[in-house]
Amino acid sequence: MKLLYYLFVFSIFSFPIYAADIHVPADYTTIQEAIDAANNGDTVIVENGIYYENINLLGKEIILTSNFHFTGDVNDIINTIINGSQPVDSDFGSCVTFTNGENQNTILKGFTLTEGSGTKTYNPAEDLFFRTGGGILINNSSPTITNNIIRDNVCTAETGVFGAGGGGIRMGFGQPLIKNNIIKDNTGGYAGGIMIAYCGGSTLKNNLIARNTATGSFNGGGGVYVDWESITLENNTIVNNHSGDRGGGMISTGTSTVVVNCIFYGNTATNGSPQIYKRFTNGNAEVTYSNIEGGFDGMGNEEGLIDVDPIFDNVSNFLLDASSPCIDAGNPDSQYYDIENPASPGNALFPAQGLLLNDMGANGGQGSESFLSVSESILATGVEFLYKNPYQNEGITLQSNRSGHFEINLFSYDGKKLSETIQIDVNEGITQIPLTINHSCIVHIVESNGTSTVLKLIKL
């Protein structure tokens, strides 16, 4: 009898435990409830929709994702939204929080994170509280953040905090992997886009960091702010960010930031150093094979550095035009080669272009993904169109704060009309507009009030 008991106990503890898929809202109504129920190795899959939550990953090694993880359809990113504007406690206003030792097996993938206000966070190195991480707060953790749109988050200082920053992301005291994200239109007193503090060895790779604003505290830093330990920026496009003081593109404080195959262009700063500001005497950057507007005098010989107009195809996704001098201009070492197009050996796979030599910016190198070619066109206040190039007939997403009527016409590049006018009525919210094309074309959209916009769809 005793032998049978031991065999029974052994069978319980040796039986394999399988990872589970947990669905929101099918299995749990909220994302946080699903995280609470998840075990290490599980995947939490969130259906399209708007989720007014401020979630915490609780140290669990799980994949938290939208359907993009399975479909690769950028619309699943655009339409799966974590909106952090309604926190239960105003001290915890980040859309997503990693503060429990999460490692790179904890993955956040395929969401739009918006309207977060940051979290009151203690910084032990300075013995002070800050409000940080409007979209994402990472502290003493090293998660993987990939294929997200982090936009329109704001960190504002208030009584009881020394400063507010990291409007899009704040990462501190860990080695997170931040790759293939669009980080745009976020605001902080400092570090409008990303605040990086004591994260030596971390890598930011193939991110678009655009139109973020720092109002100017701690010298500002519109796009990226690096504090005290060296990190690597590889194949990022850092453009059109603004600082109310210095460092519109980046501030490097107390360390030498490694920059390779990046584009810094169109960034502005009220008091100088619009692209990169070396803060304090030991703040610097080692910049190679990058396009830096106005040039840069930093560490080393700045090998491969250029100062030219990158020639973007548009100012929405900052995809390089076919004539861009940044194509094939990155580090020539094979480890940085663009992904090869299997249908055209020796040539790069779109959105990289040209040969296999690295393209500077977010669309170059082995980490390039077509997700970063998502575009937007704002027709009028409160009306926005989002679409992806190359266009594969997945449709156009319309986000509107009102109901309206739209007329859509398709034209060839030489001005010939390609189809009958498409008439569409939409309600407030998100509307998917199906649109099938056989060739690259121009899309002209007119709202009933007379406002209009033009989209350029690329069909390979």
Image: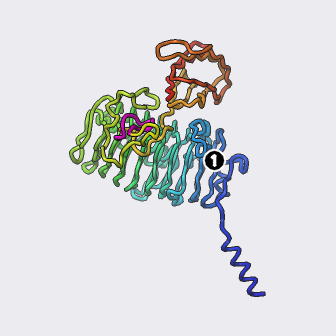
- Residue drawn at x 34%, y 42% as measured from the top left: 261
**What are the residue bounds of the magenta stretch?**
346-358
For label 1, the crowd category at 10 Å Cα-Cα, with few meaning under 14, some 14 to 19 and many 20 or more, is few
Q: Identify which residue, 413 or 280, lies in the foreground.
A: 413
Q: Main secondary structure of the magenta part?
A: loop
Q: Residue furthest left?
A: 301
Q: Nearer the viewer, residue 93 or 110?
A: 110
Quarter location, residue 100: bottom right
At numbered mark 1, what does the secondary structure look like: helix, strand or loop? loop
Judge left or right: residue 285 versus residue 240.
left
Q: Position of residue 344 (x, y in %)?
A: 43, 37
The structure residue drawn at horizontal position 43% and vertical position 31%, both measured from the top left corner, is 319
Colouring chosen for the image of the structure: rainbow
In depth, the one of 164 and 55 nearer the eye is 55
Q: Is residue 249 visible?
A: no
Please tell me whether residue 339 is drawn above or below residue 143 in the rendered image: above
Left or right: residue 343 versus residue 297 is right
The residue that mark 1 highlights is 88
Q: Which residue type does callout 1 highlight?
A: Val
Furthest-bottom residue in view?
Answer: 2
Place of residue 204 in the rendered image (x, y in percent of width and height, measured from the top left): 41, 47
Q: Nearer the viewer, residue 47 or 120?
A: 47
Would you say residue 455 sits in the magenta stretch? no
The residue depicted at 27 percent of the width and 35 percent of the height is: 306
**x, y percentage for residue 371?**
51, 38
6 lies above or below 278: below
Where, quadrant-wise, is the N terminus in this rendering?
A: bottom right
Does any portion of residue 85 appear in the rendered image? yes
